[in-house]
Every structure is written in structure tokens, then in C-alpha cells.
Image (tube, rainbow, N blue to C red):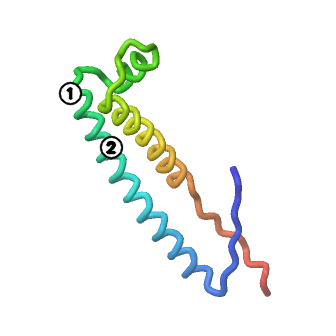
Amino acid sequence: MGELKLRAKDPDSLRRIIQSALSERLQSVTAGIKKTEEHLQQFEIKYQLSTTEFMTRFNNDELSHSFDFDEWIGEARMLAHLQQIKASIEEIDFVDFPSSRN
């Protein structure tokens, strides 16, 4: 696990700013995940396949190419990307360090 140290005249203010920005980003990413999952569900209903099954069959050349399939693949990749960002944000932990100033 990496560590990042920041210095500021007002560390508490900096901490609040960063926590607020991370919270807003997490909300945005979570909303993006929900919207992407809804898009994926529309494809799953339309084609009567789970996204996992679709990706397997598409990668095995069992399905012919179409614009819908391109979009479905893009949405599946977007979901994975957004889930990775969400996990990264949720792993951030603020650690208090003793002040080196006297």
C-alpha cells in the first residue's frame, strides 16, 4: 500500500477538502455504475443472455458482429472500469501523522 504525504498551513481544512472531493467522486462513480448496470440489463433482457455469457460467446465468435454488441461490450468494460475506480476510492484511508513542527 502506497502512502501520500501532504503539507498545508491548515491540515484539517485540506483534509476536509480532499474528503469532500473523494465523497463527490464516489457518488458520481456510484451513479455511473447504476446507470451502466441499467444499460447492461436492457441488453440482457433484449438478447436473453447475461453479460458474462454474452462476452464468452462473443469472444468465442459464436455471435455475429452488430452495433448493439459493440455498445454492450463498451458498457461491460465501462462497468469494470467504474468498479475499479470505486474500489480505489473506498480503499483510501486517512492516516494521522504526528506533526514534525515544534
* Residue position for label 2: 36
**Crowdedness near tag 2: few (<14), some (14–19) or many (≥20) residues, C-alpha within 10 Å:** many
Q: CA distance from mark 2 to mark 1?
A: 14 Å
Q: Marks 2 and 1: CB-CB under 8 Å?
A: no
x, y percentage for residue 85? 50, 50
Quadrant of res 53: top left
Left or right: 51 as drawn, with respect to 80: left
Q: Amino acid at mark 1?
A: Ile
Residue 12 or residue 50, whichever sits in front: 50
Q: Which mark is residue 64?
A: none
Report the residue at 40% width, 38% height from top.
74
* Residue position for label 1: 45
Residue 4 or residue 66, whichever sits in front: 66
Quadrant of res 46: top left
Report the residue at 52% width, 55% height from top.
89
**Crowdedness near tag 1: few (<14), some (14–19) or many (≥20) residues, C-alpha within 10 Å:** few
In this rendering, the answer to whether 9 lies above or below 35 is: below
Report the residue at 26% width, 31% height from top.
43
Q: Amino acid at mark 2?
A: Thr
Residue 32 or residue 8, whichever sits in front: 32
Sequence-first disc among 2 and 1: 2
x, y percentage for residue 51? 35, 26
